[in-house]
Image: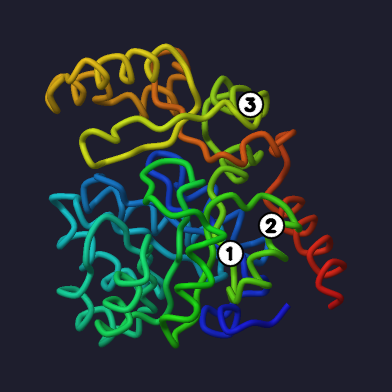
Amino acid sequence: MKTKITELLGIEYPIIQGGMAWVAEHNLAAAVSNAGGLGLIGAASAPPEVVREEIRKCKELTDKPFGVNVMLLNPNAEEVAKVVVEEGVKVVTTGAGNPSKFMEMWKAAGVKVIPVVASVAMAKMMERAGADAVVAEGMESGGHIGSTTTMALVPQVVDGVSIPVIAAGGIADGRGFAAAMMLGAEGVQMGTRFVAAKESIVHANYKEKLIKAKDIDSTVTGMSTGHPVRSIKNKMTKEYLRLEKEGADFMELEKLTLGSLRNAVMDGDVINGTVMAGQIAGLVKAEDSCQDIILEIMNDAKKLLGK
């Protein structure tokens, strides 16, 4: 399926894998890229040399385009931004901030820059700064979220900017993909569905929790701090929400979640860890390969869109 996004990124299918911290490493990124989508390495708060190593390992596994997600809140963001250029990565997505200060360097190196946005105002600001496309991410997503749903956000962003828009949040199958296209998107970004992929290094406990999840099993913590996060309900979220209700301060809440995503992803602690997942988790029924996921979505979407 050809869209402005497949042409912009040189990929076969307009499906991008989310740059999830601890989850989006070289194995998953390479598998998604080899399957015709765009795999992403999530730099998160990793040191620059770790990101460099991940990029090099990914190159050993794929000769297809892949990208890096740069979290701008990372104290090492500037060094990571340079590593991307030095290693010849051609696509960057950004989150948690404004990438304007790196734009000149990236553009000079021929890097395609795609910020993740949660509002029309932010999308317009990114377009003015020189972004090649934006990911409009609805609050159905797992992890850090905005406050507008995908269904409402995507068409408004499409109308607000002239660069291509990628829809994210609540998309896990061909129906979600087709719906995004009908809203005017040129591609989709998916996180939760790829967390449960065979090539994902996520602990088996995490995948099992995700596959068993129902439609009502996610919750949002951190509303009081201004940093809302969606994850699957467990002992930790229950405790966090109780403390929030009692007016606990930021440091007390932060203490509860420190290292908790890593503990869930790497060690399989799905009781006290943070099991980030979107509201779409109830649609994820099995551990499939990245190739099977992408082909199933594209085949179903093509039928629905009459392509």
Q: Position of residue 187 (x, y in %)?
A: 59, 70
Q: Which residue is mark 1?
A: 188
Task: Answer whether residue 218 is visible to the viewer in this image.
Answer: yes
Comparing 76 with 97, the one in front is 97
Residue 35, placed above or below residue 19: below
Q: Around disc 1, counting alpha carbons within 10 Å, would you say few (fewer than 14), some (14 to 19), or many (20 or more)?
A: many
Point 54% across, 60% down: residue: 189
Q: Amino acid at mark 1?
A: Val
Viewport quadrant of the N terminus:
bottom right
Q: Amino acid at mark 3?
A: Ala
Structural distance between the alpha carbons of marks 1 and 3 = 22 Å
Point 77% across, 51% down: residue: 292
Q: Which residue is mark 3?
A: 213
Side (left or right) of 25 relative to 76: right
Task: Answer whether residue 57 is visible to the viewer in this image.
Answer: no
The quarter of the displayed image where residue 103 is located: bottom left
Q: Which residue is mark 2?
A: 176
Point 25% across, 87% down: residue: 108
